[in-house]
Image (spheres, helix red, strand yellow):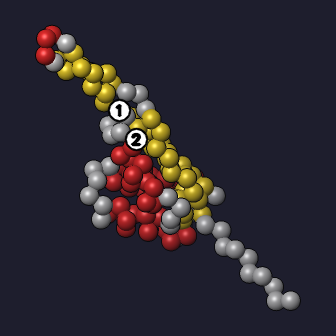
């Protein structure tokens, strides 16, 4: 069982977002949230909200509560969104471009399957 949450048009660059999500990729949900709580980056709040949204989507889809320790981040991805183009005035009447980048964040949470124990030969 898995569920996803998507957050689009986040006003932060994908590179800044990827620095954060690379630290929590392939971890359990409580471990990922604990790591995000102690990181100073601004985008950690957005990432944590999206992870929690995916967990609640999973509980809502299957009408049951799951132990958060059994949930794992199956996929977390930061893709590039649209870029706002602005210009800043420079010397001699010229203009320099300013690129305000946005990010689309996708989180997939799945119930961690227990590996079957091998039978003794």
> From the viewer's perspective, is residue 77 above or below residue 101?
below
Residue 82 seen in render: yes
Percent x, y of residue 64: 56, 63
Q: Quadrant of the C terminus?
A: bottom right
Element type where label 1 sits in the image = loop
Q: Quadrant of the N terminus?
A: bottom right
- In the picture provided, is 113 more to the left or to the right than 63? right
Q: How far apart are marks 2 and 1 (CA)?
A: 8 Å
Residue 59 seen in render: no
Answer yes or no: do the residues labelled 2 and 1 have beta carbons within 8 Å? yes
Mark 1, residue position: 101
Which is more N-terminal, label 1 or label 2? 2
- In the picture provided, is 88 more to the left or to the right than 38? left
| Label 1 neighbour load within 10 Å: few <14, some 14-19, many 20+ | some
In the foreground, 71 or 61: 71
What residue is at 24 percent from the left and 20 percent from the top?
96
> From the viewer's perspective, is residue 66 above or below residue 93?
below
Q: Residue furthest front?
A: 92
Percent x, y of residue 35: 37, 65
Element type where label 2 sits in the image = helix
What residue is at 53 percent from the left and 61 percent from the top?
26
Mark 2, residue position: 14
Percent x, y of residue 100: 31, 30
In the foreground, 43 or 64: 43
Percent x, y of residue 90: 16, 18
What residue is at 33 percent from the left and 25 percent from the top?
84
What residue is at 55 percent from the left and 53 percent from the top?
75
Q: Residue furthest right?
A: 121
């Amino acid at each position: 069982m898995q569920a996803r949450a998507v957050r689009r048009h986040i006003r932060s660059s994908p590179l800044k977002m990827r620095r954060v999500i690379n630290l929590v990729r392939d971890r359990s949900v409580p471990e990922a949230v604990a790591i995000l709580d102690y990181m100073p980056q601004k985008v950690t709040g957005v990432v944590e909200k999206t992870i929690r949204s995916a967990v609640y989507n999973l509980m809502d889809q299957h009408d049951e509560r799951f132990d958060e320790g059994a949930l794992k981040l199956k996929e977390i991805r930061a893709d590039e969104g649209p870029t706002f183009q602005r210009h800043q005035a420079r010397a001699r009447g010229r203009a320099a471009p300013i690129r305000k980048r946005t990010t689309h964040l996708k989180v997939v949470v799945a119930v961690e399957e227990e590996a079957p124990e091998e039978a003794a030969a």
